Image: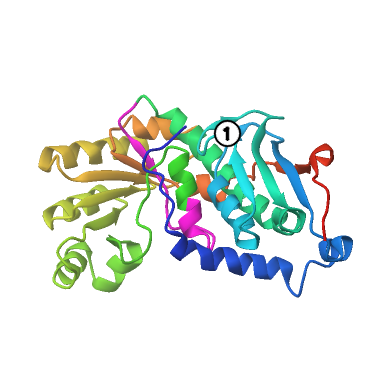
Amino acid sequence: MESAVAVLPSWIVLDNLLQSWLVEDIGRGDRTTQSLLAGEVGVGRADWIAKQSGIVAGLPIAARVFQLLSQRVSFVPIVAEGHPCQKGQVVARIHGPYEALLTGERVALNIAMRLSGIATLTNKYVGQISDLPTRLTDTRKTTPGLRLLEKYATLLGGAVNHRMGLDDAVMIKDNHIEAAGGIGKAIARIRSQIPYPLTIEVETETLDQVQEALKHGADIIMLDNMGLDMMRQAVKMIRQENDRIKIEASGNITLDTIRTVAETGVDYISSSAPITRSPWLDLSMNIDVSRIDERST
């Protein structure tokens, strides 16, 4: 599934991440490749092969990894970013200095395999509700250092992003409510402090909490870990009070339950599962020995 809103952050932001991952892997030098080539300059070609079917994600990032090692690397996607691939299919072709291909292989594959796995599982969740108006959204349960890319992968899978960080929006959760002494007090204190454009979302677990969030002007109401009957009542209550308030359902969302939750009429379903439970999509890089250019010193 292609997503028009899945836009990568600027390389100004990403390059430091990619360089740190290359430094972690290369250390004091690629002992194998440097010893094998012993200063010789060779140009090779390689194919990336999908060993499983799924949604391809991370190819522009993989290309950048190789190009940070050598600007002579050409990375040509065969399967478009965010589109499905089949087992055994060539997803990309690479041409460039042999040293760059071998040294960058693991980092580039790791990123693409991780992001493709997320996009693939996200796409399965989205497929369960694709004929309904409810949208799937991700959460902040991400791998430290990978949030930007993991949330990019959920977009490719067809989801929408929840807040990227704590500065994007206000979300008043159970511990905030406890610390403030109630939903009303929490909303009042926070609204007096935050900049105008920020929205306030309140996590609720009971109908009484939903009513309190409505009374005090929450912009978004999350129905957290509610049973289906209570969720339907909450949706009806909110719609009757103010049909502009967005409703989000969260908690124990699985491939088996997501559709029944969506059918309650909520606007969004948030789940960490597409990121936290996704297996990697298996990809491999095969050097084409029949197409290796002659080495020159």
* Label 1 sits on residue: 79
Residue drawn at 61 percent across, 48 percent down: 112
Instruction: Left or right? Give the position of 245 relative to 60.
Output: left
Spot occupied by residue 11 in the image (x, y as percentages of width and height) = 47, 60
What is the chief secondary structure element of the magenta stretch? loop
Spot occupied by residue 69 in the image (x, y as percentages of width and height) = 65, 62
Colouring rule applied to residues? rainbow
Graded by Cα atoms within 10 Å as few (under 14), some (14 to 19) or many (20 or more), the crowding at tag 1 reads: some
Find the residue positioned furthest to the top.
Answer: 131
Spot occupied by residue 64 in the image (x, y as percentages of width and height) = 57, 55
Find out whether residue 67 is within the magenta segment. Answer: no
Find out whether residue 140 is within the magenta segment. Answer: yes
Find the residue positioned furthest to the bottom.
Answer: 28
Could you tell me if residue 58 is visible in this image? Answer: no
Spot occupied by residue 35 in the image (x, y as percentages of width and height) = 88, 65
Instruction: Left or right? Give the position of 167 relative to 46.
Output: left
Q: Nearer the viewer, residue 186 or 113?
A: 113
Q: Nearer the viewer, residue 68 or 205?
A: 68
Residue drawn at 45 percent across, 64 percent down: 13
Amino acid type of the residue that numbered disc 1 sits on in the rendered structure: Val
Residue drawn at 32 percent across, 41 percent down: 268
Vertical arrangement, residue 186 with respect to residue 222, above or below:
below
Find the residue positioned furthest to the front.
Answer: 297
Vertical arrangement, residue 10 with respect to residue 226, above or below:
below
Q: Nearer the viewer, residue 218 or 21?
A: 21
Instruction: Left or right? Give the position of 272 relative to 201.
Output: right
Q: Which residues are magenta?
A: 132-150
Vertical arrangement, residue 156 with respect to residue 186, above or below:
above
Could you tell me if residue 158 is visible in this image? Answer: yes
